[in-house]
Each structure stands twice: as structure tokens, then as C-alpha cells.
């Protein structure tokens, strides 16, 4: 969300004439007649998507091998986690260390200033066309597994058995009966054969569901959840192999100092892609107080562990660039200059001049 501020020179100065825009460094507690704006700081959101599988043992798990010859059956409940993917998103916030004030003097052509909600400069003499992307947020989504409860398929004989072992034996016998009936149906040898193919299909599906439910009493069940986690990073310099979080196969994402997991690292490298400012340009800039904007640099961001690299991406970042000034000649009575800035990096995204006689 952003706010659009229209400055009228008469309201600011009590003058009917337009005024030249002057920009000065903001000092807390001092607000000249005008607007204070911030240049952005670029941040990175690390979004981790992980799946959690919860394994629940069946009621008769101890008898699975004895009655059904099922091996490797879950005997205790446990969780199993896996990182599916890691994605990076850049976004901008106000850099309170880079605050400036715009005030209007005679014959300005920059009365319209578009600011983000937090005060970042978005446009001058224009309304910003750049929409800030919606960032992923932490969430938990349950899987869409078909829920079949073995309890629903217990017969009266099973329910009246005097021990768990006897209940397990009778349940196993019921499973064998279902398999036998399915075989008879498919061979056309059942005592009560269906009238048509659709009825046969329905009967076979019902037998499959009953068998699956009863087998669940031995094998147990598995449910899944998809977890989305977010970590916001505000890089100001190079970072080499910083522990972002620890990850455990059985606990998922844990704190960076938790020995239960193994580390997942973050590295950030300033690519130093900007040419150095010339001495002549630097001297000229000292002579005029103009509108500030950012020329962003680029940085490489990696997220990895000891076995693999999850993501390796480069971003333009305000804090790895430098602050420049737009010359005063762009905002004078001879022309109206429209400028739009990136809400993420503060760099110029669009600039055009319009003569008064147009």
C-alpha cells in the first residue's frame, strides 16, 4: 500500500510562484516545510518449503508379521521431514539511515511526490506504476490423503473377541476372505454375480476399501503436511557460511544452535559490479543539493548445506550500490521531469521530460 502526496507551493510557502526543489539530509526533530523521504534497503526473504510425514502405528502392528507376514511395519509413531525447495524473494523497506527532505522554492516543477507507506520515494511528478510483489508467508497445509478408518470395518465377531491377539487374528481372516471374494468375482465364480460391469466395478471398489481399512489396523497410517517457513535477511556486507537454521529429518526446522539438526547455511557476496565514481563527478555533486536516488549494486545469495545447494541467485541491492543525485536542471521551469523509482532498490526505473508548451 502506498500514499500519494501532492504538494501545493502556496500551502508550503504562502507563495503563488513555483519553487526549485532542494533536498537536504534529514535531521530528527527538524522538518523544514516539505517532505522527508527514505531511500530503500533491499532485503531478502528466504522461503523454505518442507514436507512432514506423520507415521502412526496400527492397532495390531505387533501381529502384522504373525498373521499377515508383513515386515517393516511401524511400531511407534514418528515424523519424517524433507526440504522440498528453497526460494528467494527481494523486497524493499525504508532505510532510516538514508533519509532526506524535499522542500520547494521558486519555480519548482516537482510538486508531486509518490511515497510508499513507510516513506520510501517511489516517484516524482508521477504515480508509481510498480506494484510491490506479495511475498510468501509462513503456512501449514494438510495433505489430501483419502482417510479410511479401520475401525469402520470391524465385524461384530472382531469387536467381541476377548483379547487383542484374537481381534488381530479375526481381522487377518477377514482380509483373507475379502481377497478370496475378489478373486471369485473377477473369475465370474462368485455365488452372487453382478448384473453388469458397473455393478462389478462398484463391488470390487468396496472390497478394496474394506481391505485397505483393515490392513491399516496392522500397517498403520501416514498423513502429510506442507510447511512454508520464511526468514528475512537484511544484508549490509558479505556473509560467508552463516547458519540460517538447523534441519532434522525427524524434527524439521530447528534453531541454528540446536544440535538435533544439521546446519543449512546462507552466503551473500557483493559482486562489486559498479564502476567507481570519477573525481570530477564527485566534485560536481558537492556543489548542488539535488534529489537523491540509489544506483544499486548486485549481490549473490546462496542457501546450501553440506550435501547440496538449494538455491543460488543474484539480486540488485540498494545497500551494495551508492547514492546519486538527479541534477537540478531536471526540475526547473523549462521542463517537467517524471521519474519513477524501484520500491525494492531505489534505482530509476523510468524517467521522461515534458516541455511546458506540450
Image: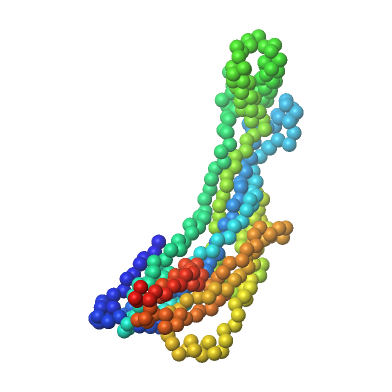
Q: Residue at x 67, y 30 (%)?
A: 218
Q: Is 71 left, or right, of 202 in this rendering? A: right
Q: Residue at x 48, y 87 (%)?
A: 285
Q: Quadrant of residue 184?
A: top right
Residue 77: x and y, percent? 64, 41
Of 54 and 6, nearer the camera is 6
Q: Is residue 32 above or below residue 220?
A: below
In the picture as drawn, the residue positioned furthest to the front comes out as 357
Of 185 and 110, nearer the camera is 110
Q: Is 270 left, or right, of 357 in this rendering? A: right
Colouring rule applied to residues:
rainbow
Q: Is 56 left, or right, of 343 in this rendering? A: right
Q: Quadrant of residue 101?
A: bottom left
Of 297 and 68, nearer the camera is 297
Residue 243, visible in the rendered structure: no
Is the C terminus in the top left, top right, bottom left or bottom right quadrant? bottom left
Residue 155: x and y, percent? 59, 19
In the picture as drawn, the residue positioned furthest to the top comes out as 191
Q: Residue at x 56, y 50 (%)?
A: 227
Residue 15: x and y, percent? 25, 82
Residue 120: x and y, percent? 43, 70
Q: Residue at x 50, y 80 (%)?
A: 324
Q: Quadrant of residue 223?
A: top right
- How many numbered marks does the figure carry? 0
Is the N terminus in the top left, top right, bottom left or bottom right quadrant? bottom left
Of 92 and 143, nearer the camera is 92
Amino acid at each position: 500500500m502506498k500514499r500519494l502526496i501532492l504538494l501545493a507551493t502556496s500551502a508550503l510557502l504562502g507563495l503563488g510562484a513555483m519553487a526549485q526543489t532542494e533536498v537536504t539530509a534529514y535531521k530528527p526533530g527538524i522538518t523544514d516545510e516539505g517532505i522527508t523521504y527514505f531511500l530503500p534497503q533491499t532485503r531478502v526473504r528466504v522461503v523454505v518449503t518442507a514436507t512432514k510425514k506423520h507415521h502412526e502405528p496400527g492397532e495390531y502392528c505387533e501381529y502384522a508379521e504373525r498373521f499377515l507376514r508383513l515386515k517393516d511395519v511401524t511400531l511407534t509413531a514418528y515424523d519424517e521431514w524433507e526440504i522440498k525447495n528453497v526460494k528467494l524473494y527481494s523486497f524493499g523497506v525504508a532505510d532510516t539511515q538514508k533519509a532526506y527532505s524535499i522542500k520547494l522554492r521558486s519555480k519548482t516543477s516537482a510538486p508531486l511526490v509518490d511515497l510508499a507507506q513507510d516513506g520510501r520515494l517511489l516517484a516524482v511528478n508521477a504515480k508509481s506504476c510498480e506494484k510491490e510483489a506479495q511475498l510468501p508467508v509462513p503456512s501449514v497445509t494438510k495433505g489430501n490423503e483419502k482417510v479410511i478408518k479401520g475401525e469402520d470395518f470391524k465385524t461384530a465377531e472382531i469387536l467381541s473377541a476377548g483379547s487383542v491377539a484374537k481381534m488381530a487374528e479375526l481381522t487377518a481372516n477377514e482380509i483373507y476372505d475379502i481377497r478370496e471374494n475378489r478373486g471369485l468375482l473377477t473369475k465370474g465364480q462368485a455365488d452372487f454375480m453382478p448384473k453388469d460391469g458397473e455393478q462389478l466395478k462398484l463391488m470390487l471398489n468396496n472390497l478394496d476399501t474394506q481391505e485397505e481399512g483393515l490392513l491399516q489396523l496392522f500397517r498403520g497410517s501416514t498423513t502429510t503436511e506442507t510447511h512454508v517457513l520464511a526468514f528475512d535477511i537484511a544484508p549490509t556486507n558479505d556473509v560467508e557460511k552463516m547458519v540460517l537454521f538447523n534441519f532434522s529429518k525427524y524434527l524439521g526446522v530447528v534453531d541454528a544452535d540446536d544440535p538435533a539438526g544439521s546446519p543449512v547455511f546462507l552466503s551473500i557476496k557483493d559482486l562489486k559490479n559498479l564502476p567507481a565514481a570519477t573525481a570530477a563527478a564527485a566534485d560536481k555533486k558537492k556543489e548542488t543539493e539535488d534529489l537523491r536516488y540509489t544506483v544499486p549494486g548486485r549481490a549473490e545469495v546462496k542457501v546450501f548445506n553440506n550435501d547440496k545447494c538449494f538455491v543460488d541467485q543474484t539480486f540488485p541491492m540498494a545497500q551494495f550500490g551508492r547514492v546519486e543525485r538527479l541534477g537540478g536542471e531536471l526540475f526547473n521551469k523549462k521542463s517537467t521531469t517524471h521519474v519513477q523509482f524501484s520500491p525494492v532498490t531505489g534505482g530509476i526505473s523510468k524517467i521522461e521530460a515534458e516541455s511546458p508548451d506540450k
